[in-house]
Amino acid sequence: MAKSKKNKNGAGKKSAKALDSSAGENGAVSEKTAAAETSAAETPALPHLFQPLTLRGLTFRNRIWLPPMDTYSAFAHDGKPTSFHYQHYVSRALGGFGAIITEATAVSPEGRISPCDLGLWNDDQIGAWSWIAEGIRQAGAVPAIQLNHAGRKGSSGCFSLDHINASVPGDEGGWQTVGVTDTPYNKNFAPSRGLTTEEIHQIVEDFRQAALRARAAGFQMVEIHGAHGYLISQFLDPLINNRTDEYGGPFINRIRFALEVAEAVRGVWPDDLPVIVRLSATDWADGGWDVYQSVELGKALKERGIDLIDVSSGGMLSGVSIPAGPNYQVPFAQEIRSKVEIPVTTVGLITKPKQAEKILAEGRADVVEIGRAALRDPYWPLRAADKLGLDRYQAPYPPQYVRGAYGTSR
């Protein structure tokens, strides 16, 4: 495997700006017959947002996906989704999203971000998930699940203001976290316990078993969470991972755990269904994880059968300044898409239909994820369809809702 390129300036604001300014033109358009051109002129092509996408044998009705966003709402602390989760996810499937990726779902109890996080660490949890996966599918979206281990960022607060971005005490449902080393995420977190090699192997197996349960529950796509400072990204980041064994040090060692998890999940997931990975393209710190290393990891993941990279950034280090703004993560997605030659998503302060459409039309990503805007409006795709000129039959309306398209305004 090629070694990662060094980024002398780190991966901060300049790298995003440089990537953005160096973007080339989109690829050449293939030739069409005169008949096809005539047909296209008579029937305008769908906006890029509403064109279908196929990964392996699975076709998504459009390229607007709901990204995983933790709701911290498994209040029984048993990892099982509830009626709230059903309403939350199925309402957005009815709202026209092409895929619904559930929030971070722990592969073990100690892998939860908080006591109120969801899980798939035992067979007893499958039934509660089946209800949700089937509801999403019946509403026309692809049901997808994100599998995660929080590592040192686990055992944090749910909605308690006393424990926001801090460890939860044991008498309130907290636990001893594990991580790459014993260094805590920040001063508000208790020290984690460094994992042994045997424990790392067990966590790989936990991901494999959780993937089997996800498929048994009816999910059609699985996402491995390798971003935002949770366990996989803790191994990746040279500013966090100071291990001296085969899982630390050189780039090839730091990506070992991520590749082992990818191989384990891909090995049990059906060949005709996709496995995707979420990555933080940069930690926004000099000398840390950057987009150039993300490209090299992306190549290795592609070799192991990963079908798409869900590109985000940050979350690895506490107190780092992130220049957030509209489209601020798009250059990273574009770089990975171009260099790895793999489909990518982009996410982050993309709120307007024309903004999202432009990203895809320029070939900067294959999918746009609508996060916070979807919390405000579960029907964002339907409103986007209207804004972009689709009629009620072209838009992803459920049959029961088509009448609702009358009287909409562009």
Image (cartoon, rainbow, N blue to C red):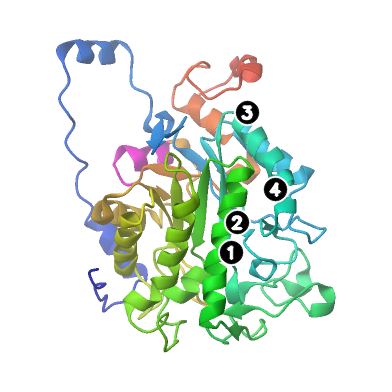
CA neighbours of label 1 inside 10 A, class few (<14), some (14 to 19), many (20+): many
Seen in the image, is 24 located left or right of residue 128?
Answer: left
Seen in the image, is 225 located left or right of residue 26?
Answer: right
Whether residue 312 can be seen here: no
Quick check: marks 2 and 3 in contact, CB under 8 Å? no
For the N terminus, the image quarter is bottom left
According to the image, label 1 marks what residue?
A: 206
Q: Check the image and report above or below for 219 versus 258.
A: above
Whole-Å distance between the Cαs marked 3 and 4?
18 Å
Earlier in the chain: of badge 2 and badge 4, it is 4
Amino acid bearing label 4: Ile
- Looking at the rendering, the stretch of residues picked out in magenta corresponds to 354-364
Task: Tell whether position 351 is magenta.
Answer: no
According to the image, label 4 marks what residue?
A: 126
Amino acid bearing label 3: Gln
According to the image, label 3 marks what residue?
A: 138
Q: Secondary structure at mark 3?
A: helix
Earlier in the chain: of badge 1 and badge 4, it is 4
